[in-house]
Each structure stands twice: as C-alpha cells, then as structure tokens.
Amino acid sequence: MSTKKRQFNIAICGFGGMGNWHRETIERIEDLHLVGSFDIREERQAFAREHGVEPYPSYEAMLADPKVDIVTLAVPNDLHRPMAIAALRAGKNVVCEKPVTLSSIDLQQMIDVADATGMLLTVHQNRRWDEDFVCARKVIAARTLGPVFRVESAVLGCRGIPGDWRQEPEHGGGMILDWGVHLLDQICQMFPKRKIRTVYATVDHVTNELVDDGFYTDLTLDNGVVAHVEVGTSHFIGKPRWKIFGRDGSAEIDWGCRGRIVCVTDRSRNDAVPIRTAAGLTKTMAPRTDDTIKELPLPAVHSDIRDYYRNVMDAIDGLAEIEVKLPQVMRVMKLMEAIRRSAEERRIVPFED
Ligand code: NAD
C-alpha cells in the first residue's frame, strides 16, 4: 500500500523578512507547493513576483482560492489573531508566526475558532529546531552533568529593537513577545513533565519607553531546577547562548553548537591553588586542578527545520500529532503574562500548582 501523501498548497500572507524566509524554506520541501503570497506593500508584492511567486491582489482573494490548503501568517503580531480567525473560517489550515497573538484572552478566541472549524492552527516555534537547543536538551538527557540544578538561556544583542512595528505596543512589540516567546517555549520543551511553580522577572527599558527592550526571569520548577532566561538589546558584551549546571559538571553552548562540557573526575580530591587578589585570597572559589576534571566535547546533533512543515502536513493528514500544540502555546502565553506581572508588581508570582 502506498503511504505517499498528497501535495499541499500553501500561501504566505505578509511577505517581509520572515515571509520570505518561509518562501525559501517551503521551496526546499517536497510535497509542499507555494501557490501565492500577499503583502499590503506593493514593493513586497513586486519582490514576490521577482522570486517567482504570484501575489494575490488581497488577503480575501487568497482565502477564497480553493486550492490553498495552508496559510502561513508572517504579518506583524497584532494581525495574527484576526487574520488567523479569518483563514480558519475560510476552511484553511493556519501556520501562524510567533508570538501567536498578544494575550491569552486573544489566543483563547483563536483556539475556539480552530475547534469550531476543525481546521489546524499551529505556531511557528521554529527555534525548537535550533541546534543549540537540541544540543542543550541532549546534554541534560545524557545525565553527563549529574542532576541539573540550573539552566541559563540568554540572547543578548546590542542593536536595540528594530525601528519598526516591534517598538509599538499596539502591534505587539517588545522583546518578551519577540524573543521571550522562543526562549520560554524552549524551557517548557526542555522539561516537559515539570511544572513551573514560580516566576520572578525584571524588565528593561534602556532604549524604549513604550515596550520592553529586554527582560530577565527566573522560573523555579517543581523539582527545584531554576531556569534563568535573559533577553537584551543593549549588551555590547554578550553571554553564551546556554549555560547548564549540574552537580557533577557544567556545560556551555553557544550559537552553532560551539562550546564545551567540564565534569569532575575525582570529587574526593578537592585541592586547589588559591586565587590571590590585591585585597584577599580565596580557595573556595579557586578552580579545581586539571587532574580532577575532564573536558568533553558537546554531543553531535542534527536538525532540519523542514521537519517543521513536514510535521504540519503529517498532522493535517492524520499521520502524526502536531508538534507545536495549542495548550503548549497557551502555557507560554500565560508565562509571558506572569513575567510582566512579576516585573510590574516587583514580586515572585506563583504560576502552576
Ligand atoms: P516585517 O515587518 O519584515 O514583515 C511584515 C510584513 O507584513 C511586511 O512586509 C508588511 O508590509 C506586511 N503586512 C502588514 N500588514 C499587512 C496586512 N494587513 N496584510 C498583508 N501584509 C501585511 O516583519 P517580520 O520580521 O517578517 O515579522 C513578521 C512576523 O514574523 C512577526 O509575527 C514576527 O514576530 C515573526 N518572526 C518570526 C521569526 C521566527 O524565527 N519565527 C523571525 C522573525 C519574525
């Protein structure tokens, strides 16, 4: 019996930076055929044409085209909800860019329409396929570090928030919604069975008054692990993408999976050469001597972002569960709301019982 799937026709609405990224990715996927695009800016309609994509004259025309199976939304964040709802009601499956929308109330409306129409709604949490994340997960699962007690995830730039809709609250601007949504989703995926008991956060307004241009949060999980997530846009000296601390070792992982693992080999031998500073001495904080530790390379990982769309097609065909599930998306949305509340009220916020 042939298990070959049918071909899916997809159209992209919003043909800016990310819309074009979707085009490039879709064009490399067998069984997925890009049938058109739409952008309100004529120059992006022309750009689509130059790249061999036939633009629709309007979003309505895209939704009215019976050959479109999937609509990918890559428009500014505030448009996700109304445009996703319109597409679902038109009988289209929807891949919505992150953040899915601006609040959990808005998201519930989208979920209700997806349920009522029976169409697939999912979110492009593409950074679940990032190699640094896949590697960090693998390091934890391998238990090389012993029991992990702290994970730090940081994305720090120094170029401010891009000078467009991302600076405006009414369009869903700010770094919690922009990068926070990725990093928080990754933490939830990294510890899928753990509850997040508490959230503490502070928010930066270094260059922007109206939206956050960075934030720091500590999430305490029900097993005591603390996940520290940090996003910044005024950091001229960065940090590695991940630091993971376990009882028996530590790992450092940067973009592109550069990094290392350092583990203890002989805990009983605890000697160290004290560090002397101009004003004091410490043996407690001195590094171990080389003969009681070993350095290991990071595990090899492979990731193919085309698997995101392959999973969407399989889920539509009933061959697989959708990877990015709406309850997961709702959890992250509520986490972002808890982060804002913690920062505003300057307190630790309880999250999950
Ligand atoms: P962008 O400003 O480059 O592109 C947005 C496009 O939407 C623009 O070309 C604009 O003209 C168009 N647009 C605006 N209103 C429209 C409407 N009513 N109908 C049709 N088109 C309309 O922004 P971007 O960086 O491409 O971001 C778009 C979305 O993708 C955002 O939700 C953003 O958060 C998301 N994004 C995701 C990732 C990721 O890695 N998942 C990366 C970047 C951006």
Image (tube, rainbow, N blue to C red):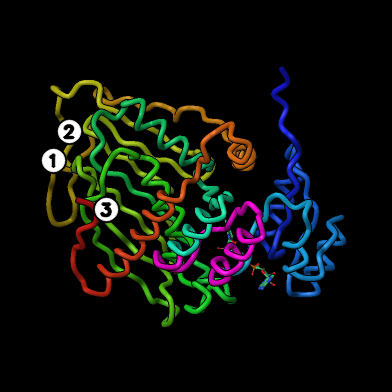
Q: Determine the residue positioned at 64% across, 40% down.
A: 313
The reply to whether dot 3 and dot 1 touch (C-beta < 8 Å) is no
Asked whether, in this view, residue 242 is left or right of residue 219, the answer is right
Task: Return the residue at label 2.
Answer: 272
Asked whether, in this view, residue 333 is left or right of residue 92, the answer is left
The reply to whether dot 3 and dot 2 touch (C-beta < 8 Å) is no
The mark that comes first in sequence, 3 or 2, is 3
Q: Work out whether residue 192 or residue 18 is closer to the camera in this orientation and state it.
A: 192
The alpha-carbon separation of the residues under discs 3 and 1 comes to 31 Å
Kind of residue at badge 2: Ala
Element at label 1: loop
* Residue 300 rendering spot, x and y as whole percentages: 51, 27
The reply to whether dot 1 and dot 2 touch (C-beta < 8 Å) is yes
* Residue 199 rendering spot, x and y as whole percentages: 25, 58
Q: Which quadrant is home to the N terminus?
A: top right
Kind of residue at badge 3: Leu
The alpha-carbon separation of the residues under discs 1 and 2 comes to 6 Å
Q: Determine the residue positioned at 28% across, 26% down.
A: 293
Task: Return the residue at label 1.
Answer: 283
The range drawn in magenta is 77-106
Task: Return the residue at label 3.
Answer: 219
Q: Residue furthest front?
A: 116
The alpha-carbon separation of the residues under discs 3 and 2 comes to 33 Å
* Residue 42 rendering spot, x and y as whole percentages: 80, 74
Q: Work out whether residue 299 or residue 140 is closer to the camera in this orientation and state it.
A: 140
Q: Is residue 43 above or below residue 263?
A: below
Q: Residue furthest top?
A: 1
Mark 3 against mark 2, which lies toward the viewer?
A: 3
Q: Residue furthest bottom?
A: 209
Kind of residue at badge 1: Lys
Ligand 1 quadrant assignment: bottom right
Residue 215 in view of the camera:
yes
